[in-house]
């Protein structure tokens, strides 16, 4: 169920309220049908976590293109939420994102495949595509301090658990 969530970038109060109503309904639908809830969260971290707590999250929650900090990653881990990291984890100015990845448990980490504007370095600025995923995965493995194969195996197992393949 998703991509759903809250996006406060260039959004006024009326838009925020409408998004929250929609997000709450999507949470209910995901729970009703036993589907993973894939969350888009842009500049709305506290409210996304609040709404999930208020509504009661479905069994499987994925933060698509994770953008929170390490403190939020710890909360996500405590709640069993998956965190999907994108090519921006390779950006020089993304240390807070790497700090979040560092504290995310290996069994809750995914690699992002749907981030057209978050192309990993050294190809930043060009359109992203699935063939660049190994660059993101390599950088993620370095942050986690594990071999690439270990991270790839964990991501594959997590993907199968979340999406059933």
Image: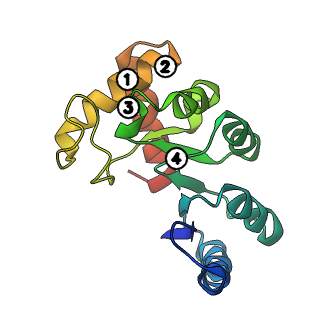
* Nearer-N-terminus badge (3/4): 4
The answer to whether mark 2 and mark 4 are in CB contact below 8 A is no
Q: Is residue 157 above or below residue 33?
A: above
Could you give the CA–CA distance between mark 3 and mark 4, rounded to whole angstroms?
14 Å
Could you give the CA–CA distance between mark 2 and mark 4, rounded to whole angstroms?
15 Å
**Mark 3 or 1, which is nearer the eye?**
3
Disc 1 crowd, CA 10 A, few/some/many (<14, 14-19, 20+): some
Could you give the CA–CA distance between mark 1 and mark 2, rounded to whole angstroms?
6 Å
Question: Which residue, given by chain and number where applicable, does mark 1 sit on?
Answer: 139
* Nearer-N-terminus badge (3/2): 3
Secondary structure of the residue carrying numbered label 4: loop
Question: Which residue, given by chain and number where applicable, does mark 2 sit on?
Answer: 143
Question: Which residue, given by chain and number where applicable, does mark 4 sit on?
Answer: 66
Secondary structure of the residue carrying numbered label 3: loop
The answer to whether mark 1 and mark 2 are in CB contact below 8 A is yes
Could you give the CA–CA distance between mark 3 and mark 2, rounded to whole angstroms?
13 Å
Residue 15 x %, y %: 59, 83
Question: Which residue, given by chain and number where applicable, does mark 3 sit on?
Answer: 91
Residue located 18% across and 50% down the image: 127
Residue located 66% across and 39% down the image: 73
Could you give the CA–CA distance between mark 4 and mark 1, rounded to whole angstroms?
15 Å
* Nearer-N-terminus badge (2/4): 4
* Nearer-N-terminus badge (4/1): 4
Secondary structure of the residue carrying numbered label 1: helix
* Nearer-N-terminus badge (3/1): 3
The answer to whether mark 3 and mark 2 are in CB contact below 8 A is no
Residue 91 falls left or right of residue 96: left
User: Who is closer to the viewer here, 94 or 28?
Assistant: 94
Disc 2 crowd, CA 10 A, few/some/many (<14, 14-19, 20+): some
Q: Which mark is residue 94?
A: none
Residue located 66% across and 72% down the image: 31
């Amino acid at each position: 169920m998703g991509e759903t969530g809250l996006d406060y970038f260039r959004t006024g109060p009326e838009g925020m309220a409408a998004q929250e109503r929609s997000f709450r309904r999507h949470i209910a639908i995901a729970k009703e049908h036993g589907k993973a809830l894939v969350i888009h969260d842009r500049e709305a971290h506290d409210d996304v976590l609040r709404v999930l707590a208020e509504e009661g999250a479905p069994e499987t929650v994925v933060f698509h293109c994770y953008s929170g900090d390490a403190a939020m990653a710890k909360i996500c881990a405590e709640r069993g939420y998956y965190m999907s990291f994108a090519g921006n984890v390779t950006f020089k100015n993304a240390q807070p994102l790497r700090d979040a990845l560092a504290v995310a448990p290996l069994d809750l980490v995914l690699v992002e495949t749907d981030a057209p504007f978050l192309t990993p370095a050294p190809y930043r600025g060009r359109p992203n595509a699935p063939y660049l995923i190994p660059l993101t995965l390599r950088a993620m493995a370095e942050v986690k301090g594990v071999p690439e194969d270990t991270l790839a195996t964990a991501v594959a197992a997590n993907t199968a658990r979340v999406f059933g393949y």
